[in-house]
Image (tube, helix red, strand yellow):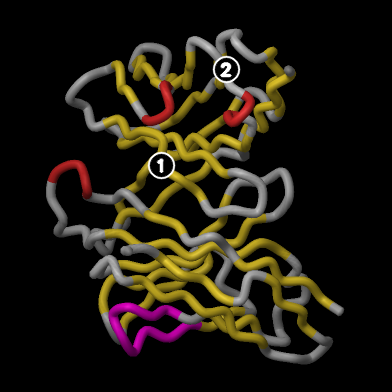
Amino acid sequence: DGGITQSPKYLFRKEGQNVTLSCEQNLNHDAMYWYRQDPGQGLRLIYYSQIVNDFQKGDIAEGYSVSREKKESFPLTVTSAQKNPTAFYLCASSTSHLGIGLSKNIQYFGAGTRLSVL
Amino acid sequence: AQSVTQLDSHVSVSEGTPVLLRCNYSSSYSPSLFWYVQHPNKGLQLLLKYTSAATLVKGINGFEAEFKKSETSFHLTKPSAHMSDAAEYFCVVSEASVDSSYKLIFGSGTRLLVRP
């Protein structure tokens, strides 16, 4: 059953602590994305990756870090430098920009991780 | 830069009545436009996508949207609302980046409430 799996569903962070959110996909997609969603707002792009071992900053990358060591995995670390981490985090994937037809630039989303600060 | 404006933060309809969720976009060229739906504490699901092949786009669950270039609009409609349609809806435009990737620009969302 193909899809995107995010874990954990709920996560709590203590002051000064780094936490890592997991995102795994078995859709064989090249591109992966991390978004942050705050109440009453749309999604904002944190980081994205088009291929393994390469990633780019999005609009709100400060206080976050990522890695892309495997095609199917794109973990997001929320560092202690992120002063307002409480939000709903969504991971997505898509075929690469080299995809053709209707599948190009359609992003598929995981179920999200809700991060709160203790 | 491209942008998306969803004109209503909340829309309330009675079950069985039509749904209209409004979206306007700004784009310097022919855009790719999407509607996504998000149920509480869930990820986003694609409802439909405008591909430039036809101005009236049919999606899942009876939803459709019409691309009107002259009005820069991409409103989402459904003839008859169902209780299960209650969710948040996002209008999205795709923007090509300098590295040839596609970034999605999200509207702020419209929360649809369906009354019994």
Q: Would you name the residue on which mark 2 appears?
A: B81
* Mark closest to the chain's N terminus, 2 or 1: 1
> Label 1 belongs to which residue?
B46
For marks 2 and 1, give the CA distance.
18 Å
Give the residue drawn at x 43%, y 28%: B61
Compared with residue A41, is residue B6 higher up or lower down, i.e. above or below?
Answer: above
Q: Dot 2: within a 10 Å radius of its alpha carbon, few (fewer than 14), some, or many (20 or more) residues?
A: many
Tell me residue B29's x, y (percent). 28, 32
Residue ID at (56%, 44%): B38
Q: Residue at x 48, y 81 (%)?
A: A75
Tell me the residue at 53%/83% (across/down): A65
Q: Which residues are magenta?
A: A66-74
Quadrant where the N terminus of chain A sits is: bottom left
Image position, residue B55 (x, y; %): 27, 17
x and y, in percent, of residue A71 in the image: 28, 80
Q: With A20 as the anchor, is B113 left or right in this view?
A: right
Q: Nearer the viewer, residue B81 or B32?
A: B81
How many numbered marks does the figure carry?
2
Q: Are marks 2 and 1 on the same chain?
A: yes
Q: Is residue B66 magenta?
A: no
Q: Quadrant of residue B46?
A: top left
